[in-house]
Amino acid sequence: MGRLIVISNRVSVPSAAGAAGAQGGLAVALNSALREHGGIWFGWSGQETAEFTGHLDMQRNNGVTTATIDLEPQDVDEYYNGYANRTLWPLFHYRIDLTEYDRNFGEGYERVNERFADSVFPLIEPDDLVWVHDYHLLPLASILRGKGVKNRIGLFVHTPWPPTRLLASLPFHERLVASMLEHDVIGFQTTEWLESFLHYVQKEMGLKIGLDNSIEYNGRQVIARAFPIGIDFAEFTEAASSAQAKEAHDRLKASVRGRKILIGVDRLDYSKGLGERFESFSRFLGDHPEMAGKAVLLQIAPPSRGDVTSYQQIREDLERKTGHINGAHADVDFVPIRYVNRGYPRAELAGFYRAAEVGLVTPLRDGMNLVAKEYIAAQDPENPGVLILSRFAGSALQLKDALLVNPHSVEHVAETIKLALDMPLAERKRRHQKLLASVREEDVIHWLDQFVKALSGPDKDSGNVASLDRVA
Ligand code: ADQ
């Protein structure tokens, strides 16, 4: 098998993660794959430059080669903050009310995809497998094909895929989807998003779907499949059993003085349902006066995409809501919602998860949601907490033994919080065992192995990626 060329909007350089282990499971897994197969991780550096030069910053750290480019401020505005995060992200999360259609965004998106293609093209060798990630780069493969790239190219979409009727509101939607059909493999998180995509290509493009979900397009065969992403189970459980995790666990436990802990951990994003979650918790406190002063919601939510107005608004909304709810339910020695806008090293996060009796994961729409899986992996199997999970997270299709909720229904979530806090140990263990088996088996290494195998093609053996050395 040839090398892997991973292309994503941003690149996670191994050395930049630092000793605290700030790198997420996906970055750890992709780095392992790159170390094993050789190859390059290419993307935007996150830096701006006055004028785009196409200069490649090539680095080799911990056995992984990365290549990054800087973008112009106009690129960042139109491509990243614009088309990616003000058009596609809200649309793909069913938020047509927040979706902005601006011609400049579309042009910027195409321009940056061209710049990505121009820059990565010279790095691609004939046998390489090219693996493109996410909604930022949907047309990249078609531009590479235009340059004569014949390699196998795969795409993995980390977000949901919207229903056809929503997608049809996007100007030039056919052009966007047609450009995606230049891949050999298109992967989605779940069968639900896959079905939406297949529905679109059938209904809007009149294409035929084969038995193996292959799509015939312009004389080529594209395979569309679900590849549910997982966490790096080995890495995460190791982090969870570290001294740093134990310290974080004990610190949090000591601070609540015997109260029950509910935990939420999310990027500050409107798709994560944080406002609804806070209201549900408030409703729970209102409906159960006997619980007054007995349960704390710890919400960890590092800000993201702060240049986009809708993200500034959600931040303000949540600050207002927190103040309001805390004002109504606090006492001199007790604050019901602890709302923390910062990131934590993974080991500390694992300690916090383990300290919490309830994991509250209630996105309104989410491609997968890895926090749900991390919460399960971090629990003490002899005394596990209870996962409350939105039915609209991709992970709900795998984690059926969680308490599944409709996050829009404040009453339903409030009742489920009570159910979770009252759940007897035997039932908690029974549910946790099944959830843990799924999180352990369908981990990120399994996902990577499956995708690379499919990308290698039907007649090629990808080698066993599952046996990779997982640790940096
Ligand atoms: P995200 O929307 O970012 O990812 P998620 O899957 O939950 O959502 O991953 C978030 C990651 O960030 C988790 O690993 C979590 O631990 C970490 N994180 C969040 N808050 C943190 C904090 N305060 N400190 C440290 N770490 C924190 C997108 C899609 C998802 C999909 C993933 C992977 O939106 O649906 O599951 O990609 O494909």
Image (cartoon, rainbow, N blue to C red):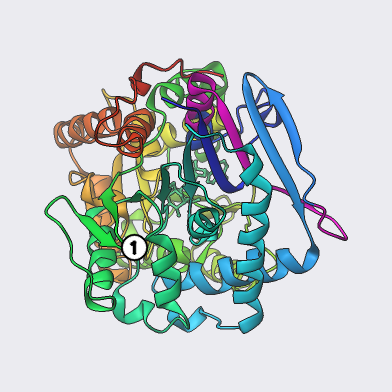
Q: Which residues are magenta?
A: 29-53
Say which of 398 and 470 sits in front.
470
**Does residue 249 appear in this view?**
no
In the image, is residue 44 part of the stretch drawn in magenta? yes
In the image, is residue 194 part of the stretch drawn in magenta? no
- Quadrant of the snapshot with the C terminus: top right
Residue at the image point whose x is 11% and y is 53% from the top? 211
x, y percent for residue 127: 47, 31
Q: Residue furthest left?
A: 211
Residue at the image point whose x is 32% and y is 65% from the top? 407
Say which of 258 and 88 sits in front.
88
Q: Amino acid at mark 1?
A: Phe
In terms of secondary structure, where does tag 1 sit?
helix
x, y percent for residue 32: 50, 24
x, y percent for residue 56: 76, 41
**Does residue 269 appear in this view?**
yes
x, y percent for residue 430: 15, 32
Q: How many marks?
A: 1
Residue at the image point whose x is 19% and y is 32% from the top? 425
Say which of 308 and 200 sits in front.
200
